[in-house]
Amino acid sequence: MTYLFRLIPLCLVLASPTQAKSPIAEILCEATPRLQEKLTRQFGAERVATGMRGPEQIMEVWSSDRGDWTMVVTYATGTSCIVAMGEDWHARTNEKSTQG
């Protein structure tokens, strides 16, 4: 019987849910000029794509020569936040179909 009481806590620990670690555990927000400075100076990134996400938000993709990429949302308030990061970025060109 005492063996059972020792086994129950072990089962509870092993059955508890785990959470995968994210490369960015928290969203990093800073003043837009400061975040842009970090991306260019510290990571060697440049802005390679932008798009509107509404009247007060711009989505930006920053990429480095190494292929690292960072997705940033810039708000009209002057704050920018890193919302995603990754690697192996490949820019696509606008290729038009030439079928006739």
Image (cartoon, rainbow, N blue to C red):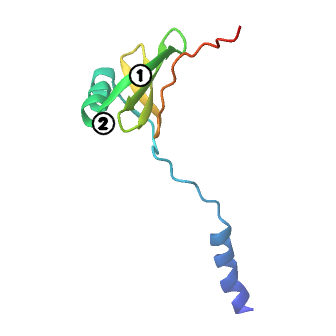
Q: Nearer the viewer, residue 30 or 50?
A: 50
Q: Which residue is located at x 42 percent, y 28 percent?
A: 81
Q: Compute the Cα span from label 2 to label 1.
A: 14 Å
> For mark 2, does the 10 Å Cα neighbourhood hold few (<14), some (14 to 19), or many (20 or more) residues?
some
Amino acid type, label 1: Val
Which residue in the protein does label 2 denote?
Answer: 43
Classify residue 54 by image quadrant: top right
Q: Position of residue 72 (x, y in %)?
A: 44, 27
Q: Is residue 11 above or below residue 84?
A: below
Q: Position of residue 28 (x, y in %)?
A: 40, 35
Q: Position of residue 14 (x, y in %)?
A: 64, 71
Point out the residue furthest to the left here: 41
Q: Which residue is located at x 68 percent, y 83 percent?
A: 7
Which quadrant of the rendered structure holds the N terminus?
Answer: bottom right
Amino acid type, label 2: Phe
Q: Nearer the viewer, residue 7 or 57?
A: 57
Local secondary structure at mark 2: loop
Point out the residue furthest to the front here: 100
> For mark 1, does the 10 Å Cα neighbourhood hold few (<14), some (14 to 19), or many (20 or more) residues?
few
Q: Which residue is located at x 50 percent, y 15 percent?
A: 51
Q: Label for residue 25?
A: none
Locate residue 18 relative to residue 21 in the image: left or right: right
Q: Is residue 71 above or below residue 52?
A: below
Which residue in the protein does label 1 denote?
Answer: 48
Local secondary structure at mark 1: strand
Q: Position of residue 99 (x, y in %)?
A: 69, 12
